[in-house]
Image (spheres, rainbow, N blue to C red):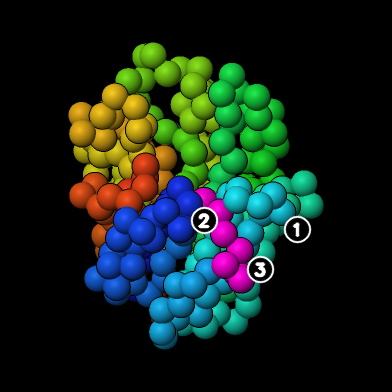
């Protein structure tokens, strides 16, 4: 299976910058989008042979996730069953025969860390959510997790220790989650490789490769024998993030 994830920073905007061309060229079995900022009624891109699932935020033009899947899942769940979190349209879970697949857009802690306390609660609740699923079958989840886990994942670690996405609180929560039985596939495959998935629009950051690795494919340790390849499409433009990919041998 080939799985793709991309924070498009607004689906309409990214669509005008080549989204469809990339989508059609990559032949993904599952293609996930975060920060779609669009509702089901507004989505005009309807590729044939794909089931389409959208979870939009209550607030118009905010957040939102989409999943395009060639295989129809046995069940689709929107959110994690907690109203405080679910109104922001951040999670879609697909249940297949042998695994759960989750597309997630983790909340940003915001400037001056205004949402850091909320983020900590969200992290705890999300961890409990995937642990509950894990008791039934292995889990794969992907998306913009809004955290650089280690110093290698950010161009300027020393000047960003209190920046949203690189606080010790956020990094520790991610470590805690991984320690419950999950693998960061890109870092597992590339222990020493510097590669980013997000760049600020300011000061030609992408051209200078002053970036952050915020986007991930995470798998249950149980699925390590199924893991084939993880990659980052640094050369693909259309958003302030670039797409990421995962290949696994799975019967869905």
Quarter holding residue 244: bottom left
- The span shown in magenta is 35-42
Q: Quadrant of residue 225?
A: bottom left
Percent position of residue 4, x then y: 37, 62
Q: Which residue has dot 2 on it?
A: 36
The answer to whether mark 3 and mark 2 are in CB contact below 8 A is no
Quadrant assignment, res 209: top left
Measuring 56% from the left and 23% from the top, which residue is drawn there? Answer: 111
Label 3 neighbourhood size at 10 Å, few (<14), some (14-19), many (20+)?
some
User: Which residue was labeled with disc 3?
Assistant: 77
Residue linked to disc 1 = 81
- Measured along the vertical axis of the image, is residue 38 above or below residue 177? below
Quadrant of the image containing the C terminus: bottom left
| Label 3 secondary element | strand
Is there any visible trace of residue 34 in the rendered image? no
How many neighbours does mark 1 have within 10 angstroms: few (below 14), some (14-19), or many (20 or more)? few
């Amino acid at each position: 299976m080939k799985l793709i994830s991309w924070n498009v920073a607004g689906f309409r905007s990214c669509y005008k910058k080549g989204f469809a061309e990339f989508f059609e060229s990559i032949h993904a079995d599952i293609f996930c989008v975060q920060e779609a900022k669009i509702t089901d009624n507004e989505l005009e891109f309807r590729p044939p042979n794909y089931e389409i699932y959208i979870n939009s935020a209550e607030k118009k033009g905010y957040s939102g996730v989409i999943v395009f899947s060639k295989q129809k899942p046995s069940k689709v769940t929107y959110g994690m069953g907690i109203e405080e979190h679910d109104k922001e349209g951040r999670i879609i879970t697909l249940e297949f025969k042998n695994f759960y697949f989750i597309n997630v857009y983790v909340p940003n802690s915001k400037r001056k860390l205004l949402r850091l306390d909320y983020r900590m609660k969200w992290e705890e609740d999300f961890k409990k959510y995937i642990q509950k699923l894990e008791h039934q079958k292995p889990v794969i989840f992907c998306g913009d997790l809004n955290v650089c886990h280690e110093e290698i994942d950010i161009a300027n670690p020393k000047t960003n220790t209190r920046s949203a996405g690189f606080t010790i609180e956020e990094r520790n929560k991610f470590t805690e989650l991984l320690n419950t039985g999950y693998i960061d596939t890109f870092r597992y495959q590339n222990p020493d490789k510097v590669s980013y998935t997000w760049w600020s629009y300011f000061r030609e950051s992408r051209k200078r490769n002053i970036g952050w690795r915020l986007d991930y494919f995470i798998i249950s340790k149980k699925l390590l024998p199924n893991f084939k390849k993880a990659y980052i499409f640094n050369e693909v433009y259309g958003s302030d993030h670039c797409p990421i990919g995962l290949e696994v041998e799975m019967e869905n």
